[in-house]
Every structure is written in structure tokens, then in C-alpha cells.
Image: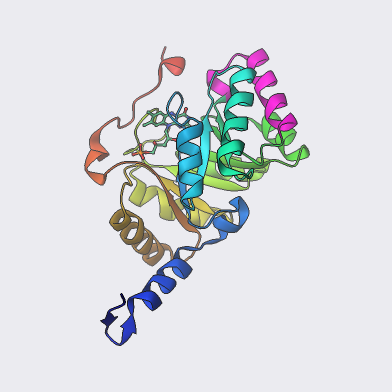
Amino acid sequence: MTGTVKGRTEVQRAVDVNHRLHTPVCDILGCQYPIVLAGMGGVARSELVAAVTRAGGFGFLGMVREPPTLIENEARSVREIVGHGSFGVNLIPAATAPDLLDAQIATCIALTIPVIALFWDIQPTIVRRLKEAGVIVAYQIGSVENAKQAEKVGADILIAQGREAGGHVWGNEPLRRLIPSVVAASKLPVLAAGGIVNGEDLVGGRHSYLRETGEGRCDLRGRRSWRNRARGCGRRPRWRQP
Ligand SMILES: Cc1cc2nc3c(=O)[nH]c(=O)nc-3n(C[C@H](O)[C@H](O)[C@H](O)COP(=O)(O)O)c2cc1C
């Protein structure tokens, strides 16, 4: 059934919304919508990644500190469910012993994982190794300074994490302030992370950021409600606590 809203059918409106939601990052990641599952360690496993991918988004397996065998099994499982390789793996170099990190990266490259999301401080040698292997690198950052560093060392996509975010939080800026300054400072597509949970957050947030920046590079990424913005502000994870 189609209704008419101000002279346009619901089908036309749905087509328009789909069109507006297709942003440059969709072409880089090979997904329909700029909605990305955060690579949550211990949480973002193959079932969740496959579900997000099949719904038109893009999923990262949360593989921080996980052994290469688990990365292999989880990647195989996503490929079996989804039938294609359009998903990524999240790693956190600063939280991983060097030998294990080396093995994780070698495994991802051998498995031809197309996209790796990295988090925490910027590690140029790791980005270089991934880029030389043809991997797309997304870097989650929490400040303009980190955004500039990530772009300089070769990242393809930035994920701006506001202090509203759950899990480990790297920066201290609220998302509404971080996004415009990161977009202004970088030529890369910018995904937003922190307190985004529903369509209203996605469309409303995207529009308000675009108004502030006048650009079309901001996509959205996240998991929960803006109401949770106070939780986890500025916390430092255990691996960096004195
Ligand atoms: C339970 C949980 C685990 C997380 N684990 C990781 C992780 O392993 N690697 C990572 O880059 N980010 C991790 N994050 C942070 C996310 O990448 C992202 O910044 C955050 O979820 C966005 O905020 P939101 O939770 O309000 O959507 C985690 C977040 C949560 C809630």
C-alpha cells in the first residue's frame, strides 16, 4: 500500500531516503547504508556482523587480543552466512602484545579481510603494513590531532568517537563538537561514534552535522541512545592507567 504525502508517494520518499543515506563511505566499504557495527571486543562476533551486513550495513568483528584461530573461525563463519567478504576486523594495537598483534595482522592479510579498524594511538608502521597488503584502514580517533595523524599515515576512513561512547573512550570531546572539527581538518570520510541508536539519531544527527560543516562526508556509527552520553566520559582503559 502506498500513501501520498505532500504529493509524493511513500515509495518515492523511501527511494529518496535511501539515496540520501548512500554516502561516500558506502562505496569504500561496499555497503548499502552508512551504518557500521563497532568492533566491540567479546561482543561483535560473526552472528552480529552477519546480521548487520545482511541488513545493508557494515560489520566489524571485535577481535582485540583474540588468537588468530578465532579470527579465522569467525571470518569463515561470516562468509558462510553472508556469502561475500564485505566485513572487517577490529584490532587495538596498544592493547595487544606485539607477537600476538603481528600474528593477528598476518592472519587478516592471509584471509584477505578487506577492511581493518584500528583504535587508540596512531601506529604508522601498522597502517603502512596493512596498506601495502591492500587493506582499507579505518582509524577510530577521539581528537582532531589524532585525526590529522591518522590521515597523514594513510588511513582511508576516520571514526570520530565522541565522549558519549560506550566501551573504552579515547577522547574527551562531545560528538557534536568533535565531528565538525574533524570534518573540517580532514579530507577523509568521517564516521560518527557515540550514543547513536535509532533512525532519528541517524538522520537528525547527520543533518545537524551537515548543517554545521556544510559537507557530505559525515556518516554515522554506533549502538545506543544519546541519553547515555554522560556514561563513560573521559574514562581511561586499564591498559593505559598508571
Ligand atoms: C561493549 C563495548 C565494547 C567495545 N569494544 C571495542 C573494541 O574492542 N574496539 C574498538 O575499537 N572499540 C570498542 N568499543 C567502542 C566502539 O568502537 C564505539 O566507539 C562505541 O561503541 C560507540 O558508542 P556507543 O556505544 O554509544 O554506540 C566498544 C564499545 C562497547 C560498548
Is residue 11 toward the left or the right of residue 39 in the image?
Answer: left
The span shown in magenta is: 93-111
* Most foreground residue, 181 or 204: 204
Note whether 189 is above or below 89 in the view shown.
Answer: below
**Residue lying furthest front in this view?**
1
Note whether 105 is above or below 97 in the view shown.
Answer: below
Decide whether residue 219 is among the magenta residues: no
Is residue 150 toward the left or the right of residue 11 in the image?
Answer: right
Is residue 113 toward the left or the right of residue 175 in the image?
Answer: right
Note whether 131 is above or below 5 in the view shown.
Answer: above
Image point (26%, 32%), residue name: 231
- Our reading of the magenta stretch's main secondary structure is helix
Residue 140 visible from this viewpoint: no
Looking at the image, in which quadrant does ligand 1 appear?
Answer: top left
**Residue lying furthest bottom in this view?**
7
* Most foreground residue, 184 or 40: 40
Disc tally is 0
Q: Give the quarter of the image for residue 90.
A: top right
Residue 191: percent from left, percent from top:
47, 49
